[in-house]
Amino acid sequence: MTLIERDKMLVWHPYSDNELYGTPIPVVSAKGSYLFDENGQKYIDAVSSWWTSIHGHSHPHIAQKVSEQIRKLDHVIFSGFTHESAVLLAEKLIKRLPLNQKKIFYSDNGSTAVEVALKMAFQYWHNRGQVRTKVIAFKNAYHGDTFGAMSVSGRGIFTKPFQDLLFDVVYVDVPTPGKEMQVVLELKSLLSNTHDQVACFIFEPLVQGTAGMVMYEPEVLNELLLICKENCVLTIADEVMTGFGRTGKFFACDHLSIQPDLFCLSKGLTGGTMAMGVTSCTQQIFDTFDGAASNSFFHGHSYTANPIACSAGIASLELFDTKNTFIDIALISEMHKNFVSEIVNYSTVKQARSRGTILAIELITGKDTSYFNEMRNKSYHFFINKGILMRPLGNIIYVLPPYCISADDLNYIYKTIKEFLESI
């Protein structure tokens, strides 16, 4: 039996859609910005394998550090024990995070990082003797697939089977250009009546990923965070996608002057090599969990602070200490901006936008702009046949390449996008 046949018999793939993806592509190796299948076909990984492989695949520095770690210490329970890699990674992250962030809590992925942040926010108020159970979130948000993360995400086809099991959330509009003042007034009005019931406000800073790479400006987010602080509402930045250079700065929140109380990190955290999540918080939040045993944060994972994953995270952060990484980020950002100006007036383009290394093109497709828009199928197969891995979001095609991608490969992607726009 072939690898594909064996896979089809036993394996259940995430977000599986046979109509769109059909037979899975059997990848046997990867290097830099390329994936190679069993037939030797090369694909440019234009989405960094679900936005994770920020430095490119099989990076020699990360591979070396992981190899050294696995020979030294593979895993140890993290309750009552610690190890060098966990402490060093925490030290490196705290240096990169805003100054108000003081403590690092490890978990396994983006969804669990969000679950941890939500539980911290709820228990923070509980430990202070207050009952605050409401959460504010943006409409059409995506924060993960576990129940808490689903609850604070936008309600739709992904969450419909579980609708009755999710806790209530109050949604406000995303402050996209032209709607900033409306959203500011909306949040002010909401908190003027219910601020003592609201535990937290969770948001994807500056770019909503799964919603279609929806972008908004730092200035309005600063205003929203200030309103929350004035009303004693905790704020949670979900930087799972936007962190680690994606928006041009190390964190999307580095564009802000007002900083949130908690951060959720994953995806690029280990350079796309290992599963790991992080939730960071302020000293004030941490201190409410100290003292009485009943105040403890009863949350953990079997692989919390896995040494091998921690070593991958350390190696990834070390690559940011070299000047080349941010030179590459700046190059991609500039090329994206230039490409947006080239295609913004195409008759098939509703809007083209970019922020940092994120490029998104919204296509004109009539009334249906849902995730299941037929343009998703058409564009996916068009680019795969051209040797480019894209993962369209309905009528939105986007590019989030590894930072090591060459200018030639980016230009090939741009050229192919133009061909696709002209073909429709």
Image: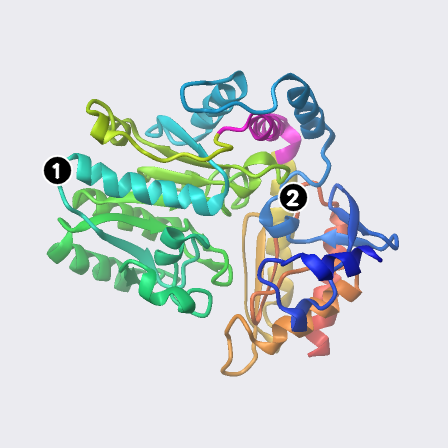
Residue reaching furthest bottom? Answer: 366
Question: Where 22 falls versus 275 (above or below)?
Answer: below
x and y, in percent, of residue 153 in the image: 39, 58
Which mark, by number, is residue 143? none
The residue range painted magenta reads: 305-325
Mark 1 vs mark 2: give the one in front: 1
Q: CA distance from mark 1 to mark 2?
A: 51 Å
Q: Helix or strand or loop: what does disc 2 sit on? A: helix
Taking the spot 45% from the left edge, 24% from the top edge, the residue there is 78
Q: Is residue 389 visible?
A: no
Task: Identify the residue position indicated by label 1 in the image.
Answer: 129
Which of the two labelled residues, at mark 1 and mark 2, occupies the earlier sequence position? Answer: 1
- Give the vertical position of 291 relative to 252 (above or below): above
Q: Quadrant of the N terminus?
A: bottom right
Quadrant housing residue 139: bottom left
Q: Which amino acid, mark 2?
A: Leu
Q: Identify the residue under disc 2.
A: 331
Q: Nearer the viewer, residue 7 or 90?
A: 7
Viewer-closest of 14 and 233: 14
- How many residues crowd mark 2 within 10 Å: few (<14), some (14–19), many (20+)? some
| The stretch drawn in magenta includes residue 320 | yes
Residue at 22 percent across and 30 percent down: it is 295
